[in-house]
Image (cartoon, rainbow, N blue to C red):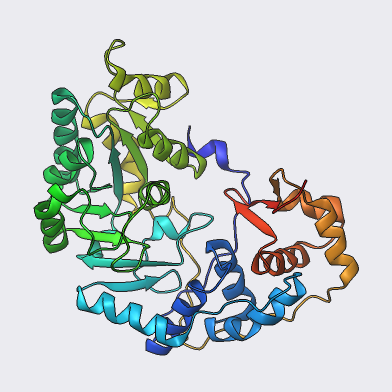
């Protein structure tokens, strides 16, 4: 469960980073909210066309070439403007992956959310971070341990991130308010969940930082919490699991952290306590067992000392505000498209394998997958895996 296990994973091309004006930010939001534009497709579109405006213009033709039988829905300008105005009213601001200020550790993951909303001290997002997660139905001992760990690690200069849930999350946030607390929400930044955390939600917005990929007013449903968990894992250098039952969202966060090469720490618990079953199993599977804050600080010391920019690859930075010219498109034929579709199936397969199987170039495969994604014909998974939608 460490970074070395993931050295051979495909690394997506980094996005350019430059300040956006209002028009550029609006175009990015429209692209993000358009049909079939997920995180990976957004990244490919920006890298291929050099900017959101150009990508928006290309969407209909790309979707048609991918095999869509109808016109792709592009987010209307008025809808995107209304979303930005709603964010402004609640004191939140959007940060796109191609803007400075986007969390660098999250940007370095394979499929970072194209846009996050931020409320509070956004400077915390640029500091080394540890995610502290655990059971909502936490024991008194687990709650105390979460507080002690979060407080001591926070005093050492590491920001604490969690999900503002009951139990361990709450304890971690409360203990780190003075040193840096980041709450990742499953809904809009103005939606308080659970309701009893209203005062803590307000306190973090005042002296910490709230972040979410969801628009203002969005009420979370069950499927949004795993999406939130991937952000919790992505913004941090490592994840500390304090308590976790055998089946829990906490273990989802640990798994997602492991998949993106983050260190996973776990505090062992009593074998007869069901709230320790998940953490004890993580340790058996290779998570690092810790019993005090010093264990974690020692492990993170090289990353913290370097500001973690040497251990988390940052996106490429461009100084000019002009968007780079789009790369000349590869010459694609219907035969190329047919060959790629024939190589796809219901089982996820990685991009490198598609290149080997089809004999097509990597860039050709990437562009064809972009067309198929916009046509709604493929599903993208983590680790550059793709599968054909509706395949028998």
Looking at the picture, does residue 306 appear above or below residue 271?
Answer: below
Closer to us: 71 or 98: 71
Looking at the image, which residue is at 53% across and 81% down? 52
State whether residue 321 appears in this view.
yes
Residue 293 is situated, as x and y percent measured from the top left of the image, at 22, 32
Closer to us: 5 or 390: 390
State whether residue 326 appears in this view.
no
Looking at the image, which residue is at 37% across and 62% down? 213
Looking at the picture, does residue 157 appear above or below residue 252?
Answer: below
Residue 353 is situated, as x and y percent measured from the top left of the image, at 77, 48
Residue situated furthest right in the rendering: 335
Residue 384 is situated, as x and y percent measured from the top left of the image, at 63, 52
Q: Is residue 216 left or right of residue 170?
A: right
Q: How many marks?
A: 0
The quadrant where residue 309 appears: bottom left
The quadrant where residue 43 appears: bottom right
Q: Is residue 219 left or right of residue 203?
A: right
Residue situated furthest top in the rendering: 272
Looking at the image, which residue is at 61% across and 46% down? 9
Q: Is residue 194 left or right of residue 365?
A: left
Residue situated furthest front in the rendering: 70
Looking at the picture, does residue 255 appear above or below residue 114?
Answer: above
Looking at the picture, does residue 17 appear above or below residue 315?
Answer: below
Residue 5 is situated, as x and y percent measured from the top left of the image, at 56, 36
């Amino acid at each position: 469960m460490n970074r070395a296990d993931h050295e051979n994973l495909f690394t997506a091309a980094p996005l350019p980073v430059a300040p956006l004006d209002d028009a550029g930010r609006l175009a990015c939001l429209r692209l993000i909210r358009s049909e079939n534009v997920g995180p990976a497709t957004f990244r490919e579109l920006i890298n291929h066309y050099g900017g959101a405006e150009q990508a928006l213009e290309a969407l209909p033709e790309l979707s048609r070439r991918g095999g869509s039988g109808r016109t792709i829905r592009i987010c209307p300008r008025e809808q995107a403007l209304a979303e930005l105005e709603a964010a402004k009213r609640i004191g939140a601001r959007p940060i796109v992956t191609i803007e400075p200020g986007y969390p660098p550790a999250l940007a370095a993951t394979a499929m970072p959310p194209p846009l996050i909303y931020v409320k509070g001290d956004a400077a915390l997002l640029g500091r080394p971070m540890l995610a502290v997660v655990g059971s909502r139905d936490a024991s008194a001992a687990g709650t105390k341990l979460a507080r002690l760990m979060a407080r001591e690690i926070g005093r050492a200069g590491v920001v604490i991130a969690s999900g503002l849930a009951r139990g361990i999350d709450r304890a971690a946030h409360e203990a780190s308010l003075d040193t840096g607390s980041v709450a990742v929400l499953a809904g809009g930044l103005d939606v308080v969940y659970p309701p009893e955390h209203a005062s803590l939600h307000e306190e973090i917005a005042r002296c910490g930082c709230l972040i979410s990929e969801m628009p203002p007013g969005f009420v979370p449903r069950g499927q949004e919490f795993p999406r939130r968990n991937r952000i919790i894992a992505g913004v941090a250098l490592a994840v500390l699991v304090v308590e976790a039952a055998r089946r829990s969202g906490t273990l989802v966060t640990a798994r997602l952290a492991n998949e993106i090469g983050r260190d996973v720490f776990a505090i062992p618990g009593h074998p007869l306590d069901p709230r320790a079953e998940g953490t004890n199993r993580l340790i058996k599977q290779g998570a690092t067992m810790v019993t005090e804050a010093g264990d974690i600080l020692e492990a993170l010391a090289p990353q913290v000392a370097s500001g973690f920019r040497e251990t988390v690859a940052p996106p490429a930075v461009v100084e000019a505000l002009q968007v780079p010219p789009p790369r000349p498109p590869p010459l694609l034929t219907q035969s190329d498209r047919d060959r790629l579709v024939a190589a796809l199936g219901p089982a996820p397969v990685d991009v490198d394998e598609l290149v080997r199987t089809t004999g097509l170039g990597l860039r050709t495969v990437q562009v064809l997958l972009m067309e198929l994604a916009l046509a709604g014909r493929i599903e993208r998974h983590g680790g550059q895996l793709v599968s054909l939608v509706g395949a028998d």
